[in-house]
Image: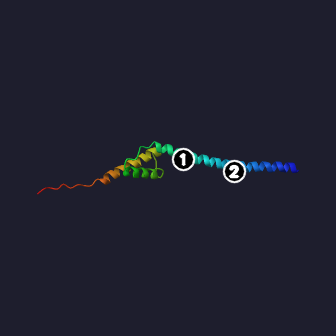
Amino acid sequence: MKESAMRDTARTSRRSLSSWFAPGLLGLGLVLAAMGAGDGARAQEPPIKSAQDAACRNEARGRVFATPDPRGLGPHAIGRQIYMACMQRAAHHGRKATRRRRHR
């Protein structure tokens, strides 16, 4: 009786160790994969050229997953549309109406 009880105890301790160890490794793997994927995505972007460019990139990153996509374009195309709309708004906002003065 004691021998079988010892075997059962050894099995349960192995199970509890493996059940604790597997999720820890999975979590660590996911964190490392996310960190590696973030670097790869950022490497594809061209360098930031102006403050307006940086602001529009941040706006596009923030709104890309909240914007509806009824045509099924995907997040990259939606982000590009948001970025271009922001850059156009910035270009029009930066221009001031100039008055022509007539000399008298």
User: What separation in Å lies between label 1 and label 2 (alpha carbons)?
Assistant: 23 Å
Question: Residue tagged by mark 2?
Answer: 20
Query: Helix or strand or loop: what does disc 1 sit on?
Result: helix
Q: Is residue 77 visible?
A: yes
Q: Is residue 101 above or below residue 34?
A: below
Q: Amino acid at mark 2?
A: Trp
Is 10 on the left-hand or right-hand side of 50? right
Where's residue 88, x and y in %? 34, 49
Where's residue 89, x and y in %? 34, 52
Where's residue 37, x and y in %? 53, 44
Is disc 2 surrounded by few (<14), some (14 to 19) or many (20+) residues within 10 Å?
few
Q: Amino acid at mark 1?
A: Met
**Relative to the observer, which residue lies in front, 63 or 28?**
28
Query: Which residue occupies 85% across, 48% down?
Result: 4
From this viewpoint, which residue is outermost toward the left?
104
Residue 80 marker: none
Where's residue 98, x and y in %? 23, 55
Query: Helix or strand or loop: what does disc 2 sit on?
Result: helix
Quadrant housing the C terminus: bottom left
Question: Residue tagged by mark 1?
Answer: 35
Give the number of callouts.
Answer: 2
Q: Earlier in the sequence, mark 1 or mark 2?
A: 2
Q: Quadrant of residue 96?
A: bottom left
Is 76 on the left-hand or right-hand side of 7? left
Query: Which residue occupies 58% across, 48% down?
Result: 31
Is 33 on the left-hand or right-hand side of 1? left
From this viewpoint, which residue is outermost toward the right?
1
Is 65 on the left-hand or right-hand side of 102? right
**Relative to the observer, which residue lies in front, 47 or 93?**
47
Query: Which residue occupies 34% across, 52% down?
Result: 90
Is disc 1 surrounded by few (<14), some (14 to 19) or many (20+) residues within 10 Å?
few
Q: Is residue 67 visible?
A: no
